[in-house]
Image (cartoon, rainbow, N blue to C red):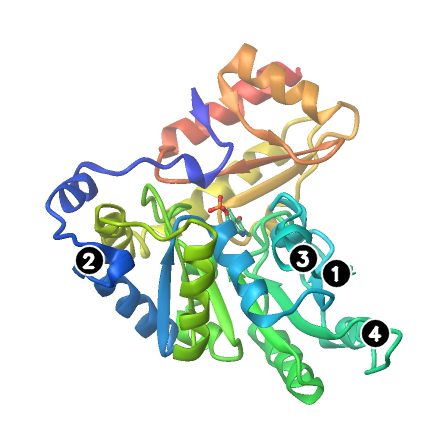
Amino acid sequence: MIDLRSDTVTQPTPEMRSAIANATVGDDVMGEDPTVNALEEYVAELLGKEAAVYMPSGTMTNQIALRIHTEPGDEVILESEAHIYYYEGGAPAALSGVMCRLVKGDRGIFTAKDLSAVTRPTDVHFPRTRLVCVENTHNRGGGKIFPLEEIGAIAHFCQSQGLKLHMDGARLWNACIATGISPAAYAKPFDTVSVCFSKGLGAPVGSALAGSVEQMQRARRFRKMLGGGMRQAGMMAAGALYALKHHQERLQEDHDQAKILAQGLSEIPGIVVNPADVQTNIVVFQTPDRAAPELEARLLEEAGVAVFAVGAHSLRAVTSLMVSPEQIQQAVSKIAAVLS
Ligand SMILES: *Cc1c(COP(=O)(O)O)cnc(C)c1O
């Protein structure tokens, strides 16, 4: 099978497995796991924040960010297709008791002006608007990069309104490799940033939240409350540390392969995709004459190519270290054969 469903299917390389096997560990809930501590320090440094907390998943990381910035009844502003809103099981309502107010972006990217149009003044009738979230790169937006300039304008607006700003940076590493902008430069305008190690970086488990010491103390409390306090978590943190040190640069290969894939797909009759829209490792393509869920099933059954339907007529293919350049070429011809 050529697995293009997600960059979460990545498995640890032999070198990563050996780093995991040799990790020094301790009880992390007691703050005694040296590998987790090293990872948290390294992430904080990379993101230019005071502190970071290792978490079991990106979902928990984002949801704890919402929880530390809000109280029940508050309002959070999110882009209409944001992962936090779309793919996290209704957690903003269940875990933080917040309302989500949505702003419609262009493939996930919105402007300070869009934001000001939905922000409400202080009034006893309205929920208190507390937090704005930005997703970079944007998953449902097809891996689109949030321009740093627009983030600056959004942060400026948030400061003027006393709003906190959180980045869902599950794929921040991809945005950094694609633009040459450092993680710290991207993180600077944000109060908190979440990052994933288990996507394209290829670590088996884990994410982190970064922010101020005070915020991270609060985050640690909610992590424990939600059952995310892990003991000898250095076994997993070692994979994340290895991934940060050895797998960031190689993300460029995934981006190059995604472009090649989009180019190949764009030449298949019945598929609509503009290769110029592909900025990182996600290719979203349209099949106007075919239902995407059916096509997803047929591609797997008849061609052994796994992709995800993400809309009625749109599908997603993601490149990662699990897929070789040869497999990308094969995927294009196999998909073409199914569609012919
Ligand atoms: C994958 C992802 C997450 C977190 O996912 P988990 O599977 O919970 O680790 C968060 N945000 C975005 C944009 C993602 O793509």
Q: Secondary structure at mark 3?
A: loop
The quarter holding residue 114 reads: bottom right
Residue 307 shows which numbered tag?
none
> Could you tell me residue 328's position as x and y percent?
44, 31
Quadrant into which the N terminus falls = top left
Name which residue type carries label 3: Gly
Front-most of residues 136 and 82: 82
> Could you tell me residue 322's position as x and y percent?
36, 34
> Could you tell me residue 102's position as x and y percent?
77, 60
Residue assigned mark 2: 35
Q: Secondary structure at mark 4?
A: helix
Name which residue type carries label 2: Thr
Classed neighbour count for the residue bearing mark 3: other residues with Cα under 10 Å, few (<14), some (14–19), many (≥20): many
Nearest to N terminus: mark 2 or mark 3: 2
Label 2 close to label 1 by CB (< 8 Å): no
The quarter holding residue 123 reads: bottom right
Badge nearest the viewer, 4 or 2: 2
Query: Is residue 86 rendered to the left or right of residue 203?
Result: right
Mark pair 4, 3: CA separation: 16 Å
Query: Is residue 68 rendered to the left or right of residue 269?
Result: left
Classed neighbour count for the residue bearing mark 4: other residues with Cα under 10 Å, few (<14), some (14–19), many (≥20): few
Name which residue type carries label 1: Met
Residue 108 shows which numbered tag?
3
Nearest to N terminus: mark 4 or mark 2: 2
Mark pair 2, 1: CA separation: 37 Å
Label 4 close to label 1 by CB (< 8 Å): no
Quadrant into which the C terminus falls = top right
Query: Is residue 118 rendered to the left or right of residue 259?
Result: right
Nearest to N terminus: mark 4 or mark 1: 1
Front-most of residues 62 and 144: 62
Residue assigned mark 4: 117
Residue assigned mark 1: 99
